[in-house]
Amino acid sequence: MPFVPSYIALHRTGELRSRAAALRAMLGSCTICPHDCGNNRLKGEIARCYSGELPVVSAYTPHFGEEPALVGTHGVGNIFFGNCNLRCVYCQNYLISQNHKLEIQNETTIGRLACMMIELQEKGCHAIGFVSPTHFVPQIVMALETAAGAGLRVPLIYNTNAYDSVQVLRLLDGIIDIYLPDLKYGDDAMGREYSKVDGYARHARNAVIEMHRQVGGVPVTGDDGLIKRGLIIRHLVLPNDIAASRETLTWIRDTLGPETTLSVMSQYFPTHRALTMPLLDRKLRESEYMKVITLVEKLGMENGWAQEFEASDYYRPEFEDRDRPFKGEADNETSDVEHTGRDGA
Ligand code: SF4
């Protein structure tokens, strides 16, 4: 039986429309993410994420750098949202995530966002990937209402920095098929220092628990061998153990179970503000990465992927070219045990 995403049923019953309305209402005093700014985005009041009523889409394209069980032969149809609710000093996508004065030019309409989803499906993409979606969840669900009516049928991936509101995630229950959070820090102090955010570990862990509640711990795979529903937790290993990898991975194992699907990433390279920060101004050392890989094995976590150590040498998004920001990826095909790139914030 072909997989049918559950948002189709929510669209038929009118529930999708109700959810979209509830989420849109939250923009009137914005509590869409844990920053809880309280600004009225419907009246153009801008706060921490520099985003108003309309979605900002910086690029949309089939992408082949995600985990192998998502990419398949035709890639994930990624929609890269501009701006962000975090301010990571090392963000690889800083040209689109921390550049709101230029990104305002990429504001689009709900109808156009719906068309992008359909276009990516028509290109054969196996899923639609919303990259850095947190601050635009209402707009995404509003567009999905239109896209589902126009024939969208592929699974939806929520590719997030994990600084998400549990209340908002509950409104995504049955809408998002695959959650792809990046658990960045095991320590709130590191989140404050390097991403300018309060309570990162607490909020992100609560968000991941809610994602796990919705889609379970063991991914559902379709007839084509690709994941159609589930949770994949990414973890980017940072130099000098700034990500507190042991705390994070141990928490995942103890809270969600050893069967949880992990995607451990080595692709860190110093960019943006990190170039002037003593603890982040160098690439990851192989010994640092292998320590984390060994820990994963010791924790008995066998499901998922680990990037090959050299990933930082070729995974460098170039958002100067919005039509083709991942030029090197054709040379970096994925294997069953490794993946080469990611898009998360
Ligand atoms: S989505 Fe933006 S405006 Fe809303 S609470 Fe988060 S940072 Fe603030």
Image (cartoon, rainbow, N blue to C red):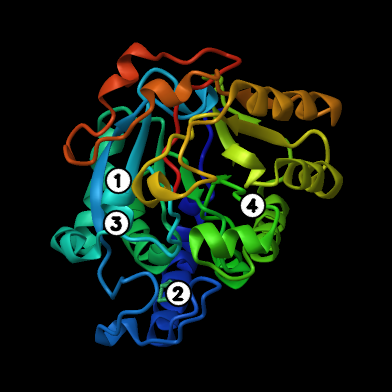
Q: Residue at x 48, y 71 (%)?
A: 19
Label 3 to label 2, Cα distance in Å? Answer: 19 Å
The amino acid type found where label 2 is placed reads Leu
Mark 2 or mark 4: which comes first in sequence? 2
Give coordinates of residue 201: x percent, y percent: 67, 60
Q: Mark 4, mark 3: which one is toward the viewer? A: 4
Q: Earlier in the sequence, mark 1 or mark 2?
A: 2
Q: CA distance from mark 2 to mark 4?
A: 28 Å
Amino acid of disc 4: Tyr
Mark toward the viewer: 1 or 3: 3
Q: Which residue is mark 4?
A: 185
Q: Position of residue 57 (x, y in %)?
A: 25, 54
**Residue that label 1 marks:** 117
Ligand 1 shown in quarter: bottom left
Residue at figure coordinates x 45%, y 64% from the top left? 16
Q: Which residue occupies the foreground of this view, 135 or 309?
A: 309
Residue at which label 2 appears: 23
* Neighbour tally class for label 3: few under 14, some 14-19, many 20 plus, Cα within 10 Å: many
Amino acid type at circle 1 is Met
Q: Is residue 252 left or right of residue 11?
A: right
Q: Horizontal and vertical percent for residue 244?
A: 70, 46
